[in-house]
Image (tube, rainbow, N blue to C red):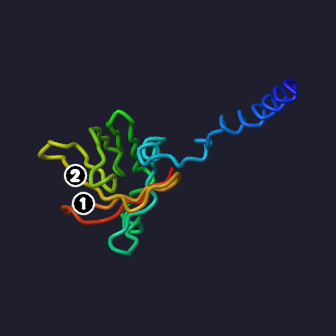
Amino acid sequence: MKNLRLLFFLFLSVLIVPLVSCDDDDDDAEPSRRELLTSGQWTAFGLYQGNQDMTPLLVAAGLNISDMKITFKDDGTYTATAVDGSQDSGTWEFTNNEQAILFDKGDQDNELTAVINKLDNSELFLEGEIETDNGTMEGEIRFRR
């Protein structure tokens, strides 16, 4: 009888231990917004003002929107290349509950906030002030990875 009881508990422990030790796999977890933003270089493919695609105007001016690139690093820095080839770098941080990016915080001349309209594994849409030869305009720059 004692052996039967021992066999029962042994059998029970063989069944319960694997069930208790199994966790949900974290492999299925969605990447954080920070991970999405910093996991590679973003290349522009469109410039929009409202719902109007302004990219053809850049093409007509001899500028290639895909020359615009930006890389966000996990340490809070970024590097960017504009359509004219000029390069810039500085700092970035999330603001507004990770719904916007604050560039160059505290720099009176360069501080800028861009609203994140879309951020996933392959696309980033940033809306804010865009500098042009004629001043600034509100618009959205669309990037792909």
Residue beneath label 2, please? Answer: 112
Label 2: few (<14), some or many (≥20) within 10 Å? some
Name the amino acid, label 1.
Glu
Residue 62, percent across and down? 39, 59
The amino acid marked with disc number 2 is: Leu
Q: Earlier in the sequence, mark 1 or mark 2?
A: 2
CA separation in Å, label 1 and label 2: 8 Å
Where is residue 23 drawn, in percent x and y? 62, 40
Q: Which mark is residue 129?
A: 1
- Residues at marks 1 and 2 touching, judged by CB atoms closer than 8 Å: yes
Residue name at image x 52 percent, y 51 percent? 121
Q: Secondary structure at mark 2?
A: strand
Q: Which mark is residue 49?
A: none
**Quarter of the picture holding the N terminus:** top right
Q: Is residue 4 above or below residue 141?
A: above
Query: For this view, does 71 lie left or right of residue 121?
Result: left
Q: Residue at x 27, y 39 (%)?
A: 91
Q: Which residue is painted at 46% across and 59% down in the image?
A: 45
For the residue labelled by badge 1, is the local secondary structure a helix, a strand or a loop? strand
Q: Quadrant of residue 2?
A: top right
Outermost residue to the left? 108
Crowding at dot 1, Cα within 10 Å, few <14 / some 14-19 / many 20+, comes out as some
Q: Residue furthest bottom?
A: 51
Q: How many marks overall?
A: 2
Q: Is residue 131 above or below residue 69?
A: below
